[in-house]
Image (spheres, rainbow, N blue to C red):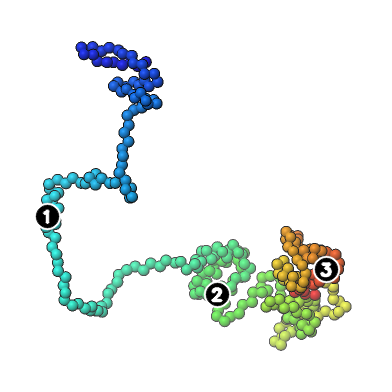
């Protein structure tokens, strides 16, 4: 039920109850349509014109209202526009040499990547070398660096001149230089490993005098009855992929399973232990020794 105030002809107000069921509203003068599903407020959707570029713009919304004074100023500016004629006379470029005195400040930005004196002293102090050789640089810079690195437990510092030799091999560690005798060189078996020659040496140190009368240490051969037995030293390193390539080239079937190289389903080769040692396992047979020989060929053996 809806209580609504209705005005009568004599101006008196009476209370009327209008029953509209579920369509009852509390707005004076609004009667919902009989065919509507529920009481709705009137709403009219605004239809906007659109083209292929979107909504059509109303240009009047962007117009600026000008008063009479602004219009007069704009008209006077248009009247003052004067067209200038271009000069058609020929021209040329004339070069004049003159000396200019520039008054400017030169600023150096040091981005060379070189260490400054403080950083160099800190780096040397953290490394803690037993000996230090300072080369290059001016005399003052070298002396400043030497004074900065010297302390209570300071290293021995050398500052050689040009073409001056400095020996630092035995000045601060428990070692000495010696010379190998010709007899020893004829006995040992040198193995070439890259640019180096490696051999297992057993010798006896003797002190002799050189041509200048100075004492020197000479390493000579040991008599055969005093030579001790030793195991062969395997020098070098390789990858299982390189070994597998050599095995396949020799006609041996190989398969890499979880880091283990399996040869002909009988022999396995793998790296094991903290030192990454090579371990070969399999039954003793001609195939086993063939695989072992190919494995040994990956190293340079010093016996």
Badge 2 vs badge 1, beta-carbon distance below 8 Å: no
Give the x, y percent position of residue 243.
73, 69
Q: Give the quarter of the image for residue 218.
A: bottom right
Give the x, y percent position of residue 189.
78, 80
> What secondary structure is marked by label 3?
helix
Give how far apart the Cα atoms at labels 3 and 2 are. 57 Å
Residue designated by label 2 = 135
Residue drawn 60% across the image and 66% down it? 154
Badge 3 vs badge 1, beta-carbon distance below 8 Å: no
Give how far apart the Cα atoms at labels 3 and 1 are. 110 Å
Q: Is residue 270 above or below residue 216?
A: above
Give how far apart the Cα atoms at labels 2 and 1 are. 82 Å
Q: Is residue 175 left or right of residue 129?
A: right
Disc 2 residue crowd, few under 14, some 14–19, many 20+, Cα 10 Å: few
Mark 3 or 2, nearer chain start: 2
Mark 2 vs mark 1: give the one in front.
Answer: 1
Mark 3 or 1, nearer chain start: 1
Residue designated by label 1 = 76
Q: Is residue 121 left or right of residue 97?
A: right
Residue drawn 75% across the image and 79% down it? 190
User: Which disc number belongs to residue 288?
Assistant: 3
> What secondary structure is marked by label 2?
loop
Residue drawn 73% across the image and 59% down it? 258
Q: Give the quarter of the image for residue 296.
A: bottom right
Give the x, y percent position of residue 34.
35, 23
Q: Is residue 303 left or right of residue 175?
A: right
Residue drawn 51% across the image and 69% down it? 144
**Viewer-side residue, 245 vs 300:** 245
Mark 2 or 1, nearer chain start: 1
């Amino acid at each position: 039920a809806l209580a609504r105030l209705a005005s009568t002809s004599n101006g008196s107000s009476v209370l009327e109850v209008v029953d509209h069921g579920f369509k009852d509203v509390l707005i004076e003068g609004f009667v919902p349509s009989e065919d509507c599903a529920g009481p709705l407020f009137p709403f009219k959707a605004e239809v906007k014109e659109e083209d292929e570029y979107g909504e059509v713009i109303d240009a009047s919304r962007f117009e600026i209202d000008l008063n009479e004074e602004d219009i007069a100023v704009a008209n006077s500016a248009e009247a003052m526009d004067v067209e200038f004629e271009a000069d058609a006379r020929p021209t040329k470029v004339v070069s004049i040499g003159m000396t200019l005195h520039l008054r400017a400040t030169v600023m150096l930005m040091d981005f060379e990547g070189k260490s400054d004196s403080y950083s160099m002293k800190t780096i040397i102090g953290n490394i803690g070398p037993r000996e230090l050789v300072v080369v290059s640089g001016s005399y003052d810079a070298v002396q400043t660096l030497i004074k900065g690195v010297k302390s209570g437990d300071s290293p021995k510092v050398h500052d050689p001149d040009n073409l001056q030799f400095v020996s630092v091999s035995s000045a601060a560690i428990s070692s000495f230089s010696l010379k190998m005798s010709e007899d020893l060189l004829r006995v040992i078996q040198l193995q070439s490993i890259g640019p180096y020659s490696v051999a297992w040496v057993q010798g006896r140190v003797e002190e002799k005098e050189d041509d200048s009368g100075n004492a020197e240490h000479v390493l000579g051969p040991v008599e055969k009855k005093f030579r001790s037995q030793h195991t062969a030293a395997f020098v070098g390193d390789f990858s299982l992929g390189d070994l597998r390539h050599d095995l396949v080239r020799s006609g041996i079937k190989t398969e890499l399973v979880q880091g283990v190289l399996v040869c002909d389903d009988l022999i396995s080769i793998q790296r094991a232990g903290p030192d990454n040692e090579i371990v070969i396992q399999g039954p003793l047979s001609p195939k086993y020794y063939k695989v072992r020989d190919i494995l040994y060929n990956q190293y340079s053996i010093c016996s």
